[in-house]
Image: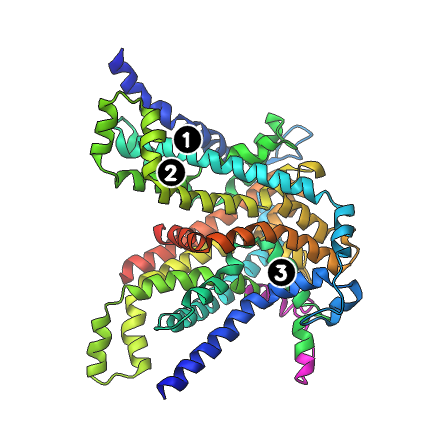
């Protein structure tokens, strides 16, 4: 009886796992199948071909978009880690007037829906002359409220003796943050780094608003416009090939660092 | 000198936040309120129009529909998500092999861009050659207009969104389930409680905080529904899938009605804040 139940569990779990994984498998083989077979494809095409990919590369600058996405997501991640730890450090380890006020403002901004600020932020970008520049994609994301709060939490948990010893050695505050606290905060850095990188890699609404020049588009934006606009010319394979290109980098990273991805994402939920 | 430096230093460290807050939060909020009283297409000078935008908003049937669509999405998506996530988390919470593998499989759609998921499901939902309809025909049923029938399209999008996000909530529920002390179940076993009784009398009350968290997280996420209808249906058929954010985006960046779009954004944000506030009140009352 017990054994039967176990087998049932495994059967059910495998079935559910297939529901989540099979569509991705289908997407990949369809992008590699001859166009006329996609409509009836379920397991394997009669022949593998890269023609969907070569057609897509002819139509859109996917390589440049990959570069743009990498540049934007990495810059934002570095910015969030640097600024987040500076601000988190001040809020957790230094005494100054207005500290609590700033902390409450940060908490408050986290509850503010982005729908209010979307249009004015776009107008600021226009006034700055940042439309169609990397600056518009990167600078507004340098400060991340969740990142600051998480650094503050983590720095609070580190022992005071660490800071005292560094001060005795004559370290400046910046040295304390980056030479003393950082090596002792690897879990926080990894968590905030992964969340930030993923969020910026997948962001699509903001790029759609501030970038019109195709050579500056990030991957999700380019793929979205390719899928929505008529340029894929209703060729499924080409559309799916562009989606595979967009998914692949994150999936590869996920295969290697799966545990960290899950822990990081889950911890943002738990903090709320 | 030394003392002064120590005093200024904290402010230097937090100054990037203050600049960012002024520029990207405080100013936009104030400016968006100013905008609601103006007509502006960015190029021509701003034109003061009093309450015209607000009057237009209350007569705008498409906006009302976009809000109702978003609410319909939430009403289907949230309960479905909780039931599926809790069910799979319960099964994963047993002594099983390959637990990590299953968890990773359920989590896969969470990390992938919404654009990818949407393009993929657009094919699965296809009317003539989509995988789902092919399956229906195989078992002898009629084809369904997943994205072409106005009565079904929003449900299809909500199902897809559940498929995309449920992995995250499975993990959150797993964490929640682990906080239930095992001796509660042991005591219930001694009393001869059934599986169902244990679930409803012990598990559910104990993981209530996680359920509320999931509700609030997916409410905020659901209110920002945009890319799925944008890519999949463009808001159609018959505006049945146009979401509030998609409509605000269209007003602002298709028609360049900056003043009106800002009015819609402000009004919709107030709805979001109200809904989340009421949900939080419920949590405080119940816990």
Residue plotted at (75% across, 50% down): A56
Magenta-colored stretch includes residue B150: yes
Q: Nearer the viewer, mark 2 or mark 3?
A: 2
The residue nearer to you, when weighing A92 against A180, is A180
Instruction: Give the chain letter at badge 3.
Output: B
Q: Is residue A144 above or below residue A250?
A: above
Q: Nearer the viewer, mark 1 or mark 3?
A: 1
Callouts 2 and 1 close, C-beta under 8 Å:
yes
Instruction: Give the chain letter at badge 1.
Output: B
Q: Is residue B71 visible?
A: no
Q: Nearer the viewer, mark 2 or mark 1?
A: 2
Q: Which residue is mark 2?
A: A148
Q: Locate residue B100: give its quadrant.
A: bottom left
Instruction: Give the chain letter at badge 2.
Output: A
Q: Residues within 10 Å of mark 1 (few under 14, many from 20)?
A: many
Q: Which residues are magenta?
A: B136-158
Query: Which circle's residue, 1 or 3, is located before the other in the chain?
Result: 1
Element class at badge 1: helix
Give the dominant element type of the magenta stretch: helix, strand or loop.
loop
Q: Quadrant of the N terminus of chain A?
A: bottom left
In percent of width and height, residue A150 lies at: 35, 42
Q: Is residue A177 above or below residue A154?
A: above
Q: Which mark is residue B241?
A: 3
Magenta-colored stretch includes residue A84: no
Horizontal side of residue B283 vs A24, given as left or right: left
Q: CA–CA distance between discs 2 and 3?
A: 36 Å
Horizontal side of residue A129 vs A6, given as left or right: right
Q: Locate residue B198: give its quadrant.
A: bottom left
Q: Residues within 10 Å of mark 2 (few under 14, many from 20)?
A: many
Q: Which residue is mark 1?
A: B17
Disc 2 with disc 1 on a shared chain:
no
Q: Which mark is residue B105?
A: none
């Amino acid at each position: 009886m017990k054994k039967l139940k176990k087998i049932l569990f495994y059967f059910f779990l495998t079935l559910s796992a297939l529901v989540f994984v099979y569509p991705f498998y289908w997407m990949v083989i369809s992008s590699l199948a001859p166009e006329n077979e996609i409509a009836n494809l379920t397991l394997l095409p009669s022949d593998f071909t890269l023609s969907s990919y070569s057609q897509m590369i002819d139509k859109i600058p996917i390589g440049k978009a990959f570069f743009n996405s990498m540049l934007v997501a990495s810059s934002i991640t570095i910015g969030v880690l640097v600024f987040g730890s500076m601000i988190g450090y001040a809020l957790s380890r230094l005494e100054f007037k207005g500290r609590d006020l700033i902390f409450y403002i940060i908490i408050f901004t986290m509850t503010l829906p982005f729908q209010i600020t979307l249009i004015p932020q776009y107008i600021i970008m226009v006034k700055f002359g940042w439309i169609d520049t990397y600056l518009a994609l990167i600078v507004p994301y340098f400060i991340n409220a969740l990142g600051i709060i998480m650094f503050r939490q983590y720095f609070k948990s580190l022992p005071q003796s660490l800071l005292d010893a560094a001060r005795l050695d004559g370290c400046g505050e910046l040295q304390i943050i980056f030479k003393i606290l950082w090596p002792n905060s690897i879990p926080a850095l990894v968590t905030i780094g992964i969340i930030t990188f993923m969020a910026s890699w997948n962001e699509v609404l903001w790029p759609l608003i501030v970038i019109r020049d195709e050579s500056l588009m990030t991957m999700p934006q380019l793929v979205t416009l390719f899928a929505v606009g008529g340029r894929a010319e209703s060729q499924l394979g080409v559309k799916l090939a562009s989606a595979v290109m967009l998914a692949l980098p994150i999936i590869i990273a996920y295969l290697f660092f799966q545990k960290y991805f899950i822990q990081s994402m889950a911890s943002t939920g738990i903090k709320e | 000198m030394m003392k002064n430096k120590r005093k200024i230093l904290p402010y230097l460290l937090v100054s990037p936040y203050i600049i960012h807050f002024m520029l990207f939060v405080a100013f936009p909020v104030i400016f968006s309120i100013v905008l609601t009283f103006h007509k502006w297409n960015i190029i021509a000078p701003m034109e003061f129009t009093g309450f015209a935008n607000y009057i237009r908003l209350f007569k705008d049937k498409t906006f009302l529909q976009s809000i109702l669509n978003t609410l319909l999405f939430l009403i289907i998506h949230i309960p479905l998500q909780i039931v599926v996530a809790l069910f799979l988390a319960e099964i994963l919470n047993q002594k099983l092999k390959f637990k990590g593998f299953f968890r990773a499989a359920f989590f896969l759609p969470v990390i992938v861009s919404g654009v990818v998921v949407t393009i993929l499901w657009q094919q699965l939902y296809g009317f003539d050659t989509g995988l789902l309809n092919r399956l229906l025909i195989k078992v002898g049923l009629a084809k369904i207009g997943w994205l072409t029938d106005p009565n079904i399209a929003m449900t299809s999008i909500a199902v897809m969104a559940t498929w995309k996000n449920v992995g995250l909530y499975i993990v959150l529920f797993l964490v929640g389930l682990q906080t239930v002390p095992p001796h509660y179940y042991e005591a219930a076993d001694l009393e001869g409680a059934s599986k169902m009784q244990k679930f409803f009398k012990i598990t559910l009350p104990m993981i209530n905080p996680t359920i509320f968290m999931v509700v609030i997280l997916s409410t905020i996420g659901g209110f920002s529904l945009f890319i799925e209808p944008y890519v999949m249906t463009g808001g159609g058929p018959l505006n049945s899938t146009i979401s509030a954010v998609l409509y605000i985006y269209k007003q602002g960046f298709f028609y360049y009605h900056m003043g009106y779009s800002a009015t819609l954004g402000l009004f919709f944000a107030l709805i979001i804040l109200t809904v989340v506030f009421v949900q939080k009140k419920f949590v405080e009352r119940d816990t």
